[in-house]
Image (cartoon, helix red, strand yellow):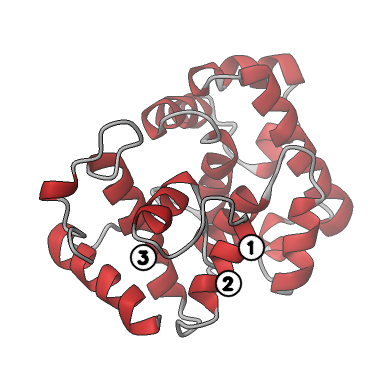
Amino acid sequence: MSSRLMEIHDRLLAHFGPQHWWPGDDPFEITVGAILTQNTSWTNVEKAIANLKATGYLSCAGLSSLPLEALAELIRPAGYFNVKARRLSNFLRMVEQQYQGDFAGMLLEDTGILRQRLLGVKGIGPETADSILLYAANRPVFVIDAYTHRILVRHNFIDEDTDYYGMQTLFTDVLPPARHLFNEFHALIVRTGKEFCKKAKPLCNVCPLEGA
């Protein structure tokens, strides 16, 4: 299994090159992006983050100072802006309650404890929590998303009904726990899902994973 997964990684890396993912100037921006990107495209998230930067509110203290309605308006381009404003507010409340508002201190927390606290935030599920852990906190946690599920099913790694943790352990049980590897592998899977392994009309005959 390890050699087969690494063959997929190596094929994708050779085809696409390094992805330099996740985009963001600092861990807080990456975290906000991870929360905002639920159910929307990254292009829309970039517009929302640009609004927060332009107004000077892209910080833990800055976002906490905003009324919920004002925050929702600033992140409107990300879609579901009222829902996502509440999710951001819930996250900021956790940082305040558990880490006295010290976001940098939060990033130093034990991985298991931090993951449970992130999952305890209403609106943050396993994918978002693990994205924060991997991309903002630099922990070797493998992120699973819809693209991963689709590719694993189509290449007969898993059954259709395999859950998040079943897919995650497929990677973490056989690959070395290396943050850079997990980061690059997930980013390459996302790129493949967007460009080749599409939901309705997959481009299998030109996909770099054809025959893998």
Nearer to me, 119 or 67: 119
Q: Position of residue 175 (x, y in %)?
A: 45, 82
Residue holding disc 2: 169
Q: Which residue is mark 1?
A: 165
Classify the position of the C terminus by image quarter.
bottom left
Residue 49 location, x and y as percent? 48, 32
In the depicted structure, whether residue 128 falls above or below residue 111: above
**Residue 129 pos. (x, y %):** 65, 54
Please tell me which of labels 1 and 3 falls first in the chain: 1
Horizontal arrangement in the rendering, residue 151 relative to residue 208 (left or right): right
Query: What type is the residue that disc 1 sits on?
Result: Tyr
Q: Residue at position x 53%, y 55% from top? A: 27
Q: Position of residue 92 (x, y in %)?
A: 75, 42
Q: Amino acid at mark 2?
A: Thr
Q: Which quadrant would the N terminus be assigned to in this image?
A: bottom left
Marks 3 and 2, Cα distance to the nearest angstrom? 14 Å
The residue nearer to you, when weighing 119 against 20, is 119
The residue tagged 3 is 185
Calculate the distance from the C-alpha at mark 1 to the C-alpha at mark 3. 17 Å
- Quick one: 142 or 206, which is closer to the camera? 206
Q: Say the numbered circle drawn on residue 24.
A: none
- In which quarter of the view is residue 67 placed? top right
Q: State whether residue 98 appears in this view.
A: yes
For the residues bearing labels 2 and 1, Cβ distance under 8 angstroms: yes
Give the Cα distance between marks 2 and 1: 6 Å
